[in-house]
Amino acid sequence: MLSLILPPLVACLVIVAIHSYLGLHIIAREVIFVDLALAQMAALGATISVLAGSHPGSAASLAYSLGFTTLGAAIFSMTRTGPRGRVPQEAIIGIVYVVASAAAILVADKIPGEGGEAIKEILVGSLLWVTWPAIVKLAIIYAAIGIFHFVMRRRFLTISFHPETAVANGWSIRWWDFVFYVTFGLVITFSVPIAGVLLVFSFLVVPASIAFQFTKKTETGRMSVIAWLAGLVASAGGLLLSFTWDLPTGPLIVVSFGALLLVAYLGRRVAIRGR
């Protein structure tokens, strides 16, 4: 069983390594569903590429997906609103998500033959069938993005956690938002075909949510460690239960993330009362 479970487990750890960190930014910015919106934009691009004659996972399909996630990044960076904004950015994110979903359905309806199955694979992912070359490729791409975020961490962390300081420093918030969302879109584009939309959302939001419960906003390093450990526990536990009980892997890992979040919340409440 180890030979079967090891590749998807390593893939989960590679994905959660970058997603758990980006999730801290997403929660701090209070744009929780931007992941789903960008994932759907990537799926729309992949759907259009299939209609144009490309195969899912090909270089052309990847180019289409990156193009549409870049468009999403531009939209979200231009529509950033302050506390007094007339339309909350979450509303814009929701609109982008539903429009991209509807457009993907319309495009998929025009795909001949087994196009619908190809689109299903794009949305659901293929975690159980991930190969070692795909994992290595993913790790290299994520390492490059991680290094970039590490070098630019002062800018990104300040804008996410202390936007008023970034404004006072005279930084171009929308430009740096665009850069952030482009790199975020790159991560989403490569992770969704492997893990699927729901699992990618769980990788992003749940570990970060757990980390926020046990740290202060200034403890970003500690947040990152807790988030990655939470992702490790939920991924490994979900995979093990999936193979043991012969249940669908992706949904069970998502449920494991939810269960771990509940345990963390209850544990924190008990600790607070104990004090």
Image: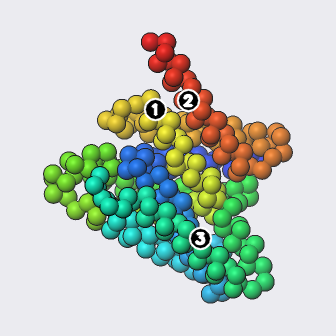
Question: For the residue labelled by badge 3, is the local secondary structure a helix, a strand or a loop?
Answer: helix
Front tag of 3 and 2: 3
Using residue 102 as the reference point, say whether residue 27 is left or right of it: left
Whether residue 138 is visible = yes
Q: Position of residue 239 (x, y in %)?
A: 72, 43
Category of crowding for the residue at label 3, using alpha-carbon neighbours closer than 10 angstroms: few (below 14), some (14–19), many (at least 20)? some
Q: Residue at x 77, y 43 (%)?
A: 242
Question: For the residue labelled by badge 2, is the local secondary structure a helix, a strand or a loop?
Answer: helix
Mark carried by residue 101: 3
Of mark 3 and mark 2, the one earlier in the sequence is 3
Structural distance between the alpha carbons of marks 3 and 1: 33 Å
Q: Nearer the viewer, residue 83 or 48?
A: 83
Q: Name the quarter where the N terminus is drawn.
A: top right
Q: Position of residue 148 (x, y in %)?
A: 36, 56
Residue 107 falls in image quadrant: bottom right
Answer whether labels 3 and 1 touch (C-beta < 8 Å).
no
**From the viewer's perspective, is residue 61 above or below residue 156?**
below
Mark carried by residue 264: 2
**Tag count:** 3
Category of crowding for the residue at label 1, using alpha-carbon neighbours closer than 10 angstroms: few (below 14), some (14–19), many (at least 20)? few
Hey, which residue is sitting farthest right in the picture?
246
Residue 240 falls in image quadrant: top right
**From the viewer's perspective, is residue 251 above or below residue 66?**
above
Q: Amino acid at mark 2?
A: Ala
Answer whether labels 1 and 2 touch (C-beta < 8 Å).
yes
**From the viewer's perspective, is residue 222 above or below residue 178?**
above
Residue with the mark numbered 1: 213
Of mark 1 and mark 2, the one earlier in the sequence is 1
